[in-house]
Image (cartoon, grey):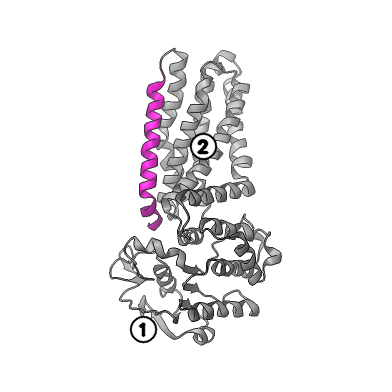
Amino acid sequence: MRAGATHILRDITLNVEPGEAVGVFGTNGAGKTTLLRLLATLLKPATGTGTILGADLSSDERYEVRPRIGYVGHVPGLYPEMTLDENLSFIASAMAIDHDAVLSSLAAVGLAGASDRRAEVCSHGMQRRAEFARILMTEPEFLLLDEPHSALDGNAVDLVDDLVRRTVNAGGAAVLVSHERTRVEKLATYSVEIKGGTLS
Amino acid sequence: MRTSFWTQATAITKRDLMRERRSGEVLWVTLPFGAIALLLIPIAIGTDRPTLRAIGIGMYWVIVMLFGVLIAVRQAHTESQAQRDVVALTGIDPAAGYVGRVIASFLFLIGFEAVLAVVTIALYDVPLDGWAWMPLVMVLVGLGLSLLGTLAASIVSTGRSASALVPLLVAPLSVPLLIGATQTFEAIRLGRSSLTWTLMMTIVILLLAIAGVLSARTLQES
């Protein structure tokens, strides 16, 4: 993976099988988020090959598998002017998901009472919960979570852990990028370290 | 279940309309400034009625173009990378996303053009002959600016200077639309056929639509 002449990631070999959760650790700027966005098919590798849910990362096949991927970045992707319900309803309408699923997902993350609140007036923790509600609603097979426990309280942390376990137990997979080693290592089948854009 | 192209485009249009309803950027900022610009010209050049009548329609299109560009490109600075990532992962076809954004921009621009047309008639006392063509030309200009602005916003959306770059890119490229719109009315005033000018605008629109749809996927990746 390159930005101009600079390699952000190089010589990456990572195999995540169904039923596995992989922890990825590393310092700031090591390339963790870039790796996650690459796995989410949001970036195209400059060289090499990769397969996500059977789709070649470098070909147009990757567009087909995107709805099966659940990606939560460290910056919430909510529209601030829209309510939490509207944010999720927009995703639901684009993916042919019933509005009932929007309401039940918000309720599952403890946001039933805040569904008509605009995202811009919600705390960062609430926005993170809403992001996880989106993941619950879309029921992805491959979870890609960037700092999954950041800005969450105890209940929400348990909820995220439960989401990862359920996905993995159902035959899905997860990659968790985090600074919180202890918490993630409890969930992970194995862990890797990323340093200077290379996995070890 | 994968949704159809038009379901995806409609979802994007509804999202943009909802965001505008909440932020009021077009309604409460761009529209009043456009109307004020139309008001300032008679103040600056005087209220000589024949002069105002002569320049009215031209001023209208200049103001529509300048402020319309801002409406058409607003998405370049209103959508973050995180938001774009979420949309991409819903599996929305980038071409459907492009069409959905164009439709939303078009609706804003049509409303904007309609209000400014009323202001122009009121302030400039423009002759109403040939105004039967107005809806068609408004649609062509609105569509052209929407297609152009959305395409330009997609091209530079990931750049750090996007909000400054996009209007600079779109303004000169919208000149054929400005020429087409003004010359349509000039031809009508002179009793000539305006078909050539509306045809030129239609061709510009078709080319922009094709370019936007075909490049949507590539631009999403850039």
Q: Which residues are magenta?
A: B193-222
Give residue B85's position: percent from left, percent from top: 47, 61
Q: Nearer the viewer, residue B185 or B156?
A: B185
Query: CA–CA distance between discs 2 and 1?
Result: 53 Å
Instruction: Please give the label number shown on residue B68.
Output: 2
Q: Which residue is painted at 32% across and 71% down in the image?
A: A50
The residue where tag 1 is placed is A200
Residue A61 seen in the figure = yes
Give me the chain letter of mark 1: A
The quadrant of the picture occupied by the C terminus of chain B is: bottom left
Judge whether residue B216 is colored magenta. yes
Q: Which residue is painted at 49% across and 52% down in the image?
A: B8
Q: Is residue A78 left or right of residue B143?
A: right
Q: Residues within 10 Å of mark 2 (few under 14, many from 20)?
A: many
Total numbered labels placed on residues in the image:
2
Are labels 2 and 1 on one chain?
no
Q: Residues within 10 Å of mark 1 (few under 14, many from 20)?
A: few
